[in-house]
Image (tube, rainbow, N blue to C red):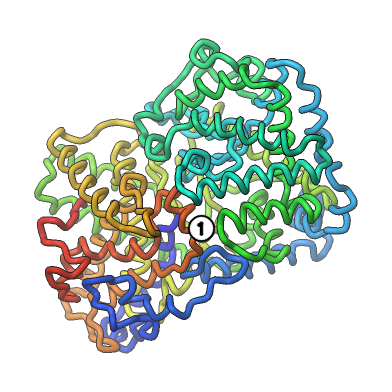
Amino acid sequence: MTASRWLLATAILAALASPAMAQTKPSGIDLAGMDKSVKPGDDFDSYANGTWRKTAVIPADRASTGIFLQVFEKAEKRNAELIRDAGKGNPPANSDARLIADYYAAFMDEAAIEKNGLAPLKASFDQIEAISSVKDLSRVLGDGLRADVDPINATNLDTENLFGLWVSQGLEDPTHSMPYLLQGGLGMPNRDYYLGKDKSMADARTAYQTYIAAILKQAGTPDAEAKAKAIFDLETKIATAQESIVDSEDIHKANNPWPTAEFASKAPGIDWAEYFGAAHLDKAKTINVWQPGTVHDVSALVASQPLQTWKDYLRFHAINHSAGLLPKAYNDLSFGFYGTVLSGTPKQRDRYKRGIGRVNADLGDAVGKVYVKRYFPASSKAEVQQMVKNIIAAFADRVDSLDWMTPATRAKAKAKLDTLLVGVGYPETWRDYSKLKISPNDPVGNSLRAGRYETAHQLAKLNAKVDRNEWWMTPQTVNAVNLPLQNALNFPAAILEAPFFDPKADAATNYGSIGAVIGHEISHSFDNTGAEFDAQGRLANWWTPADEAHFKAAGQKLVEQYNQYEALPGLHVNGQQTLGENIADVSGLTIALAAYHKSLGGKPAPVIDGLTGDERFFLSFAQSWRTKTREAALRAQLIGDGHAPGQFRAQTVRNIDGWYDAFKPQPGQKLYLDPSQRVKIW
């Protein structure tokens, strides 16, 4: 997730070891990228990044550019080397190296892919064609259930399977894992694309229906236009049944444990016995239904809509899901819609880069083990762990200083910090892929088998002890995450790179960038969702009524603040949808500033490049969020993402008293907030 960069904290301790040495370090601020014609109090993002944005060019194969892309491209180059090296020396069968080499070779063999056409999907097509009843349909739908829901954001709505599966500990019982069933079934990113009234959404709908028809025509489907309309109409009905992102983010609305025996009465339509049997969930006694109204209404659609429409829907999605692994005609159609129409990206990424992405998606830990051996030394892991401890300590100090929090709530908050599990760099236990069949000439089969293998891995947790140390990201992922149910944090190795962290730069810059991100991830344990979970990851209210009221009132002020930001003409940031990330930004920046000041040991910060320590701190924060995004991709982010766009995250500074001291914004300037209006949560 965007707030991930904090692994980069690794060498900060060394950078801070000697105050005298720190004075000789460069500021780490991109002075040339600033636009000093803009007043900081009017637009701090443009002040920090305006000149960079005027000259930055978004690569033709990307929807945006910025700091994350820089770090991602470094990791991608390393991954390319690792994957290409995997086949050297004829590694033994079923070894990680052999699996990586064969998977990549199959993806890169374009001649074989063209020759095979749609033949790799024959088994799926035969299964679909044999459907002659709701019972058959239910069995096929259950067989298609995959653990493909984004575990970092369990409100994910865009799985192409009718429902999504997630397996984790229970919301109220952290000692046992349980399956979660979530809404899905759409070919476009989320329900707003089907139901939105503005022209951009209407245009997307027209383009999507055209795309469905084009895929069906390419596959030789009779009456492709009519079938495309029927498929689109069915998906529109599914979208109408879905919950909004904001409602799906409400963890209390998601707490709906249904006994499997009651699904038939709670959500009639699907033959649930057939569905659960095919999904290997028939032994589960209870399933948590994240969006119960959606499951009820979609189940009814299974019984009420024509079987032929469902069969056409399933056939289209079988092709659509594997389009990037099929002949060029299908791949080009898919990119034309998802890449160009929905994201505004004119050029598809080079095939070898797409191959790297595929290998990492399906064999992530196999690549990750090699990645950390080559690029993430034990010293880096130890330094990051120490940095995290320092930021957690600063957070604890902050909790102690809150004048609005009662002792009872303060004790519970401190308990969460004390039991927070922090994974740095890589997991302690790696995935075992030795039983996964990977062929050097079957890219579609490799992907489908990997999906089943991952689903089996997740379902196996239902009969095992809960592992709070479980990782949800691979080491080569440029990201980081907070996991509320586990009360845990994951910081993958690949994020530990400049410019997020630069051991040659001044401490203020490192604290403003990586320190703020470390604080951000810690703060997620106390955002509007994280604050609902106790020290054991149990959904439980640990707040006194007065403290809870204060916390929610502060959050509402932040909602209203972000609602004012207009990202595109007539399209504003959704303050409620982005609330959790915005709370973490405000809190993380507050804690990072406190930690930076403490690191100075009572000595004044040096002035470097004409900038004070606090000026460098805040400029570093804003430059960390510099982004330039294509309009279509920005629109998609505003509609479906829990993060505000980078230019508005940079404006978080307006809530921090220290920023006012550093840059002296004046009343009447656009960002200026009276002290009583500044949002302070942690």
Task: Give 295 or 279, whichever is nearer the viewer.
Answer: 295
Q: Position of residue 409 (x, y in %)?
A: 18, 39
- The front one of 583 and 503 is 583
Instruction: Report how many numbered discs are placed on residues in the image.
Output: 1
Residue 631 x %, y %: 49, 61
Q: Is residue 86 visible?
A: yes
Residue 447 seen by the camera: no
Q: Is residue 632 left or right of residue 317?
A: left
Residue 293 falls in image quadrant: top left
Quarter of the picture holding the N terminus? bottom left
- The residue identified by callout 1 is 633
Question: 246 or 235, which is in the foreground?
Answer: 235
- From the viewer's perspective, tell me whether residue 542 is left or right of residue 176: left
Residue 152, compared with residue 654, is above or below; it is above
Give the quadrant of residue 88: bottom right
The 10 Å Cα crowd at callout 1, few under 14, some 14 to 19, many 20 or more, is many
| Residue plotted at (54% across, 58% down) | 477
Q: Which residue lies at the image location 87% right of the left edge and 58% below the top edge?
A: 111
User: Residue 116 placed where, x, y %?
Assistant: 88, 48
Residue 182 horizontal/vertical position (percent)? 51, 32
Q: Looking at this rendering, what residue extends furthest in the right direction?
A: 115
Who's the residue at 73% across and 31% down the image? 312
Please, what is the three-letter code of the amino acid marked with disc 1? Ala
SS type, badge 1: helix
- State whether residue 653 is above or below residue 614: above
